[in-house]
Amino acid sequence: MSDDKDNLDITTQLVHASGRNQPPTGQPTATPIYASATYTYESMAEIDRVFGGELPGYIYTRYGNPTVTALETAIQVIEAGATACAYSSGMAALHAALLACELSSGATVLASQDLYGATTNLLQAILGPFGIKTVTVDFANLDEVRSKALEIKPRVLIAETISNPLLKVCDIDAGAEIAREVGARLIIDNTFASPYLCQPLKHGADFVVHSATKFLSGHADAMGGIAVSRDAADSMALIGVMKLVGGVLSPWEAHEILRGVKTLAVRMDRHCENARALAKRLSNHSRIGRVYYPGFTSADRQEVANRILRECHLGALISIELKDNSREAAFGFMDALKLCVRSTSLGDVFTSVLHPATASHRDLSPARRRQLGITDGLVRISVGIENVNDIIADIEEALGA
Ligand SMILES: *Cc1c(COP(=O)(O)O)cnc(C)c1O
């Protein structure tokens, strides 16, 4: 077919006239969105070599996409891992990391009792019927973790850098040591800390997972997940889940998240500074019974937080328990907020509040919630990057209402 598109029928021109332009002269300074599902080559011989892995190149966006690769490369470098693979959500990334640990029927997972609710549900409701058993334990109690691990010989240990909603910082070094002792792999969900505050692979984790929907993206406008392996030997497993389960990240979302990643450090500095000031301010408020914040713990927990998290950064989250420890009091306080947003997420530029008992931990029985310390009067605050005095004023006014 000639290059001269003028001779073609309009029906053909409509399909082909825009052309498949060569990359422009002048390199884009921002990563373009490669909104293409497929890729073509000059010859079949070339396609054959790309398929065979002899020639680098993209074939089909479920196997890889240049915009998604740019995000994966950034996170792989920042987390200092061998391979990063992006998925359509944090849950898809967690699923991939779990499958990459060769979980098969009869295997056991030793999970933190404080895991994100959906992660516990994934283990129990989705992996459970495949014969994979999950045992939960308090990862803040290392003696309990070790003795359970020695007893059940799990294939996987899984915990979060900062737990939800009580914000316990995980001693990843100790967790990795226990995992090595029993021949298990350690997966760390680093969503609450972000790679700016903690790089779990450097503390001995085998896999680190992020819900990119939260701090990495940071603007409540994208959803995605990333799993990173420390060892190159695990790369094919992560890539395999991406290609065959197919929960891949769209290039549009990758572009949004990549934009967020560029400002992660400045956002986190402000998030953490604001959270510290707010925690301090609320710590002796007459209507608050208890403030959960990694800075308000025992000396040994403090040592863990200082070792695991970036210096002077204790995270962007605070949980408060109202003295009137009821659902009505919590809802009343939350409804009275004018600036802080009632929303089911965290890590956004705006301050947001969530009621764990009716949101993240809704599916648990009241007895189990009590056991975990998640009371009806508990409210989680994800502190934003606004002027802290405005955040404090809104919260104090709502507490007084
Ligand atoms: C939100 C979240 C997830 C799930 O991520 P999605 O992007 O919503 O799928 C997993 N772990 C933690 C700690 C989270 O906060």
Image (cartoon, helix red, strand yellow):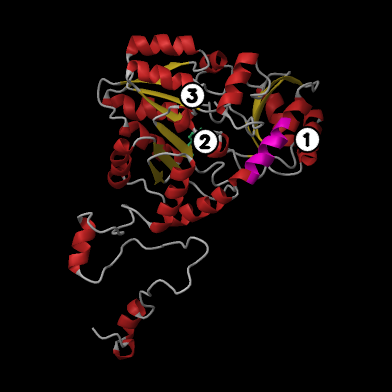
Q: Circles 2 and 3: CB distance less than 8 Å?
A: no
Identity, as a three-letter code, of the amino acid under mark 1: Ile
Across and down, in percent, residue 343 comes to 61, 39
Please tell me how crowded label 1 is: few (under 14), some (14-19), or many (20+) other residues with Cα within 10 Å: some
Quadrant the N terminus occupies: bottom left
Q: Which residue is mark 3?
A: 172
Q: Secondary structure at mark 3?
A: helix
Q: Secondary structure at mark 2?
A: loop
Which sits earlier in the primary sequence, circle 2 or circle 3?
3
Which sits earlier in the primary sequence, circle 3 or circle 1?
3
Judge whether 384 appears above or below 70 on screen. above
- Give the alpha-carbon distance from disc 2 to disc 1, as whole Å: 25 Å
Q: Is 41 colored magenta in this rendering?
A: no
Magenta stretch?
Answer: 266-276
Report the label total. Answer: 3
Identity, as a three-letter code, of the amino acid under mark 3: Ile
Quadrant the C terminus occupies: top right
Q: Which residue is mark 2?
A: 191
Q: Which residue is mark 1?
A: 392
* Beta carbon of the mark 2 residue lies under 8 A of ligand 1: yes
Judge whether 79 appears above or below 19 on screen. above
